[in-house]
Amino acid sequence: MAKAKKEPVVYEVHTDGSALNNPGPGGYAAIVRCGDTKVTLSKGYFLTTNNRMEMMAVIATLEEFGPNARINIYTDSQYTIDGSTKWVRNWYRNNWLTRNQEAVKNKDLWMILNDLLRENKVKFIKVKAHSGVPDNEEADQLAKAAARKPEAHDTQFSNV
């Protein structure tokens, strides 16, 4: 009798980032589900931007569950989706310059994210912000709460 093929574990993750001013205090959050298990991740920073917090939500998730993880990431950040699926490979090949030969913004985070994406099987799914998707709404609230209570000495800001 042939053994049934075991399906790989796939994590379902809703992420969000928030900056109360842009730049200003910010936070990120991720709601991670695997079967009946739910884990939340969040952290706040004194000085950051919304785009950086959107990216940090994905980075923090991949750092927790990689390498070789299978992760579906639901996000409302088109910047994070496009950067991760379309732009980052060309930036890497072009020594972190845009096609206009300008330095890539948030290069430090894109470099980390690029490495993590290469180590894992990640699928990005776009969700409309504030559309009533429960885990997306919870991630939004956790990111805003983290932005209101940043951890001591933490900044997440780059001019690059």
Image (cartoon, grey):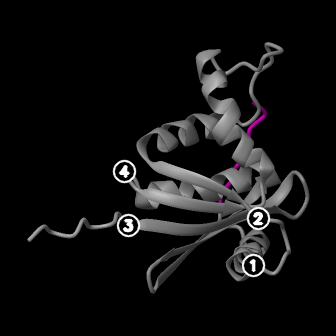
Q: What is the three-letter code of the residue carrying label 1?
A: Val
Q: What is the three-letter code of the residue carrying label 3?
A: Val
Q: Earlier in the sequence, mark 2 or mark 1?
A: 2
Q: Earlier in the sequence, mark 3 or mark 2?
A: 3
Please say if the residues under marks 2 and 1 sit with CB atoms less than 8 Å apart: yes
Where residue 126 appears, as percent x and y from the top left, is 74, 58
Where residue 32 appears, as percent x and y from the top left, is 54, 72
Q: What is the three-letter code of the residue carrying label 4?
A: Asn
Residue 68: assigned label = 4
**SS for tag 2?**
loop
Q: Residue at x 76, y 73 (%)?
A: 140
| Quarter holding residue 14 | bottom right
Residue 133: assigned label = 1
Marks 3/2: CA distance?
22 Å
Q: Is residue 109 left or right of residue 36?
A: right
**SS for tag 3?**
loop
Q: Is residue 4 above or below residue 100?
A: below
Q: How many marks?
A: 4
Q: Which residue is mark 3?
A: 9
Residue 143: assigned label = none
Q: What is the three-letter code of the residue carrying label 2?
A: Val
Please say if the residues under marks 4 and 2 sit with CB atoms less than 8 Å apart: no
Q: Does the image show residue 28? A: yes
Where residue 146 appears, as percent x and y from the top left, is 71, 72
